[in-house]
Amino acid sequence: MKLLTKDIKNKVLESMERILDEEREAIIAANKKDLDAFDSADRAMYDRLVVNEAKIDGMIQSVKEVRSQDDPVGKIKSSRELENGLKIFNKTAPFGTIMIIYESRPDVTIEAAVLAFKANNKILLKGGKEAGHSNKKLEECWHKALTENGLEPEAWIQLLNMNRQETQEFLKNPPEKLDLIVPRGGERLIRFVKDHAQCAVLVSGRGNNFLYVNKDADWDKALQVIVNAKTHKISACNALDKILVDRNIPGYEDKVRELEKELRQNSVELLADDDVRKILPDTSPVEDESVWYEEFLALKAVIGSAGNVEEAIDRINKYSGGHSACILTEDEATAQAFMEQVDSAAVYQNASTRFTDGGQMGVGAELAISTDKLHHRGPLGLEQLVTNKYYVYGNGQVRE
């Protein structure tokens, strides 16, 4: 794939910012067709599907932030000259063709494509049928921006319109070389892609995020963080699902009751383990262990107890999705131990898990939140959409 200059890429992105602004009404009108055909009873999916003025502002801002970042391609990672005179440079290089499969969220059509394009990759976008009109309109915006700047649109950004069977066949026998596939959705989607893909798959895994209230926590701070992490945006993969309260916190029972009151005032449905139900008998029991593995994507949470930080760490590492985990404590040593030992892509002390997001973490847009450990973990931003290549310069050297 030909390497584009930073200037050409940034001109395309400038055009895209303008086009998104000009096409606001048409984008929202296309999205309304999707919303009208969707069952709004599935609140989490419906929230993800909505495109409004604020969402378009966010799309434009994502493009601007990526445009302002350095070109990630061609950066020298290392260099050396050997005794035989060979000069070896390890440089960043594009992946080639990236495919992302995602559900519901039309803004992924902007964020994924802007990152892939700035990193000099072609991207194939396989959005869900529920966002068909929205995604098609956003693809038209991309193609207009590319055409304005003398680039072949489908050589860089292409929206795929395939049903499940067609997608399966595409994964098994791709009509062009695929270098990386990113499934962004639930466990069924991830399994589907892994079962059929013939190239590398980078998983954007489930949330099921845990928060542990240590015995040394500032309780007022804790309540504020818990409510934000649980209720700020229930459809996000960084939303809170499970809360563990240390039984040794001063005033344990009163604090658990206060936590219940605070969450119920925010319309959160509560389940509790056996220990907590002794204090909160009106809460629903955790009837099956599978609930501890579940990502809710709803105004729903489990409150459980923990005897100490080690017990909390073990519980989190057993059940969480490896996305985000938080400890609320004023003890720095305890926080450090928790953050080192919890096996999650992002670990927090005294802050909401809602910050596990590319924009919030300073990488601009995000392709996904990777819960894999290879090739990257956490928000997939611009710098993570390149691989590397060795450039070796010689003068007739042969190996003896």
Image (spheres, rainbow, N blue to C red):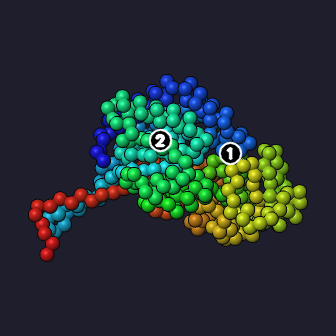
- Name the foreground residue: 342 vs 285: 285
Residue lying at 46% horizontally and 31% vertically, measured from the top left = 141
- Name the foreground residue: 26 vs 176: 176
Q: Quadrant of the C terminus?
A: bottom left
Disc on res. 159 = 2
Residue lying at 28% horizontally and 45% vertically, measured from the top left = 2
Q: Do residues under tags 1 and 2 come within 8 Å of each other at their CB atoms?
A: no
- Name the foreground residue: 153 vs 363: 153
Crowd around label 1: few <14 · some 14–19 · many ≥20 (10 Å): some
Q: Residue furthest bottom?
A: 400
- In the visual, does 339 lie left or right of 171? right
Residue lying at 83% horizontally and 62% vertically, measured from the top left = 285
Image spot of residue 181 (x, y percent):
46, 54
Residue that carries the numbered disc 1 in the rendered image: 44
Give the residue type that dot 2 points to: Leu
Vertical relation: 343 (above or below) 238: below
In this rendering, does residue 394 appear at all? yes
Crowd around label 2: few <14 · some 14–19 · many ≥20 (10 Å): some
In this rendering, does residue 61 appear at all? no
Image spot of residue 281 (x, y percent):
89, 60
Residue lying at 45% horizontally and 50% vertically, measured from the top left = 99
Nearer the camera: disc 1 or disc 2: 2
Vertical relation: 170 (above or below) 314: above
